[in-house]
Amino acid sequence: MRVLVVDDEVRLARSIRAGLVAEGFAVDVAHTGTDGLWLAQENSYDAIVLDLMLPGLNGYQVTRDLRAAQNWTPVLMLTAKDGEWDQIEGLDTGADDYLTKPFSFPVLLARIRALARRGAPPRPVTLEAGDLRHDPASGRTWRGDTEIELTARETAMLALLMRTPGDVVSKRTILESLWDMTFDGDPNIVEVYIRHLRNKVDRPFGRSAIQTVRGAGYRLAADGG
């Protein structure tokens, strides 16, 4: 198992490397974001342990650049910044896990192993179907270069459909995902929101991407059409 450690605290990076090597890992180390990004792009890793505050490029920028380049190597952010918004930004940028300093090495080791088991399936930061794009982090949606204003519920429904373009999503799945278990209102509320979405992301652009599959549910055309 090969791991990249990117941390500008030289002694800490050396300590992490020694611990991982003792566990049978092959470990590369970088002390700047620029060097870490280069190594991550040039080599294949099972996981990346990435500090947040780095010279050159910070951890957010490194992760964002990797995901933009379709590099889905699991990233564990390891940082002294423990604010909830720091964690939110790190995860929304494309990181897979977040561990604050000081930390327990056995916990770090377990998390690295968990990330390596998960592998590196595509986890795009921006959802796309043709020229329809949605950024889950900011909640913004575009058709081509035109930004579309959606309500929070409309945004959640569109994101649900865009996560598996071309696949049918049942009405029950939509209800359970967007409304809580105690919802006892009219189940036709799903049709109401589907209609709202079509009126915003399809009809103004002459499209019919949101399709009804009778007796099954709804799907978003994979080409966004």
Image (cartoon, rainbow, N blue to C red):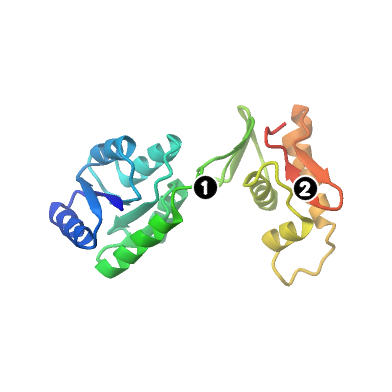
| 68 and 42: which is toward the camera | 42
Residue at 72% from the left image edge and 57% from the top image edge = 174
Lower position in the chain sequence, tag 2 or tag 1: 1
| 18 and 127: which is toward the camera | 18
Query: Tag 2: residue type?
Result: Tyr
Q: Is residue 5 above or below residue 204?
A: below
Q: Is residue 172 above or below residue 161?
A: below
Looking at the rendered structure, which numbered label has been put on residue 112?
none
Image quarter hosting the C terminus: top right
Query: Tag 1: residue type?
Result: Ala
Compared across the picture, whether 109 is left or right of 67 comes to left
How many discs appear? 2
Percent coordinates x, y for residue 145 in the rendering? 60, 27
Percent coordinates x, y for residue 23 in the rendering? 23, 63
Percent coordinates x, y for residue 55 in the rendering? 22, 41
Q: Residue most toward the bottom?
A: 182
Residue at 50% from the left image edge and 44% from the top image edge = 122
Residue 206 at least partly seen: yes
What crowding class fits label 1: few (fewer than 14 Cα within 10 Å), some (14-19), or many (20 or more)?
some
**Callout 2 touching callout 1 (CB < 8 Å):** no
Percent coordinates x, y for residue 147 in the rendering? 62, 33
Looking at the rendered structure, which numbered label has been put on residue 137?
1
Residue at 18% from the left image edge and 54% from the top image edge = 13
Compared across the picture, whether 151 is left or right of 172 comes to left
Compared across the picture, whether 186 is left or right of 125 comes to right
Looking at the rendered structure, which numbered label has been put on residue 218?
2
Q: Nearer the viewer, mark 2 or mark 1?
A: 2
Residue 82 at least partly seen: no
What crowding class fits label 2: few (fewer than 14 Cα within 10 Å), some (14-19), or many (20 or more)?
many
Residue at 34% from the left image edge and 66% from the top image edge = 110
